[in-house]
Amino acid sequence: MNTIIVLHLVSPASGEVVEAMARALVAQLADVQPVRHFWQMVRKDRDVTAVLDGVQEKGGLVLHTLIDAAHRQQLEDGCRRLGLPCLFLYEPFLGAIIEHFGVSLRENASPRVVMDHAFRRRIEAMRYSLGHDDGLGQQDLDEADVVLLGASRVTKTPTCMFLANRGIKAANVSLVAGMPLPDTVIKARKPLKVGLTVAPRLLAEIRRKRFDVPPEKVGTAYSDIDAVAEEVREIRRMIVRHGWPIIDVTSRSIDEAANIILDLLQRHREAQQQAE
């Protein structure tokens, strides 16, 4: 039988950090069944009081990211009176950084400022990616961080959405065999340009399922395996000629491909800074 562990996840913002940490920690434990209670936007004394009431009722352990010193003290004192552990997630990391580098904490540090900025950045990136999906909005591609290129149905759009959720402005352009690359893509200097490719057989299958192609029409150029294979080869050659990196997503999940792109973007930005 699995051991039930009750976790109270307390955050002054959306709770993404404390939730991610809780998931990572629970994943290391054997034979447990976690019960999570989320306490978000804890920014006032009465919010902390509500958390303590819930902790007293449910029991368990508290993980929190309360930066405000008064609220942190209120929560930790309350848990101490209840005889329950209360862990400030930033403590070991901040302590090590402060000690090693000899820096100090910012006065009146507000996680809300950081979280609100990150939230606005993600929303702005989402709007940009939606407005630059499948070749839309090519007139301002230089505002993009990343431009994804490839044949139709190689997961460009979902990869862009994943990147946008990380605050990256990602546009995508579908390439067509036999047609030249759009000038707007070639002329854009700021963004990282990355090609996505996939095994022709898998791409043909995706297209057939996406558009519910009946068996008698499987031989159409859009989903015929031979035609798709030639299309993939030609588009790959087109991207290689420009020296842009290509990621084969045949056996990669969207998050795996996106993480490769993020690494490439970091190197791309460093190279641009050195060139300036």
Image: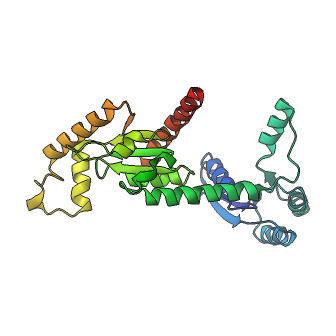
Quadrant containing the C terminus in the rendered view: top right
Report the front residue among 274 and 106. Answer: 274
Q: How is the image coloured?
A: rainbow
Residue 145 placement, left or right of 14: left
Report the front residue among 38 and 29. Answer: 38
Residue reaching furthest left?
A: 216
Q: Residue at x 40, y 54 (%)?
A: 157
Percent coordinates x, y for residue 268 in the rendering: 52, 33
Residue 103 placement, left or right of 10: right
Percent coordinates x, y for residue 170 in the rendering: 47, 50
Q: Residue at x 17, y 40 (%)?
A: 230
Percent coordinates x, y for residue 103 in the rendering: 86, 36
Residue 231 placement, left or right of 105: left
Report the front residue among 63 and 144. Answer: 144
Percent coordinates x, y for residue 156 in the rendering: 38, 50
**Rendering quarter of residue 14:** bottom right
Figure label count? 0
Q: Mark yes or no: residue 3 visible.
A: no
